[in-house]
Image: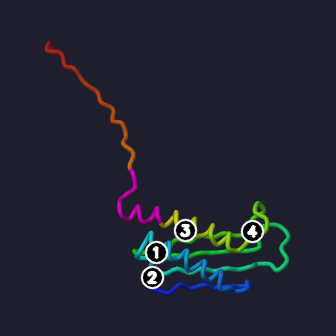
Amino acid sequence: MKVPLKISYRNVQKTEDIDELIREKCTKLEQICSYITSCRIAIERPQEHQQIGNPYRVRLDITVPPGHELVVKRGVSKGEMHEELAFVIRKVFNSARRQLRKLTEKQRGEIKSHITKEAQTFIKKSLSE
């Protein structure tokens, strides 16, 4: 990356384990796309005493030349009750990996194109005309 990884925390205790997990996941993203310009991640806990849904919100912002920006967010939802922060971070990075892979394949021209069947018609002309 040209710009160093930026990690910001809001209402979340910063730990070495979370930092290490994020750096490891960013390294894996760089294996997919070696020309990532920047990667920013924001981790926040919007409410101190939340009763339903996930208490963490994670946003990942990746910039890839020429002028592409991938944004992946994972926020509060009722379906997932109180997931661990590491699990939410893994989900965000898995989604980002899929998007980044799709973008790099598109840039390299590796996307499959489906062959369409062409309609063929034979016109027979009679000699009497």
Q: Which residue bears the numbered disc 3?
A: 96
Left or right: residue 34 compared with residue 129: right
Foreground of the two, 38 or 117: 38
Q: CA distance from mark 1 to mark 4?
A: 27 Å
Numbered range of the magenta stretch: 101-112
Q: Secondary structure at mark 1?
A: helix
Between discs 1 and 4, the one toward the N terminus = 1
Q: Which residue bears the numbered disc 2?
A: 1
Is residue 71 rendered magenta in the image?
no
Q: CA distance from mark 4 to mark 2?
A: 30 Å
Please say if 103 is above or below 85: above
**Residue 4 position in % (x across, y down):** 50, 87
Q: Choose top left, top right, bottom left or bottom right for residue 61.
A: bottom right
Between discs 1 and 2, the one toward the N terminus = 2
Position of the C terminus, as image quadrant, is: top left
Q: Are marks 4 and 3 in contact (CB under 8 Å)?
A: no
Q: CA distance from mark 3 to mark 1?
A: 11 Å
Q: Secondary structure at mark 4?
A: loop
Q: Choose top left, top right, bottom left or bottom right for residue 53.
A: bottom right
Foreground of the two, 70 or 30: 30
Q: Which numbered circle lies on residue 30?
A: 1
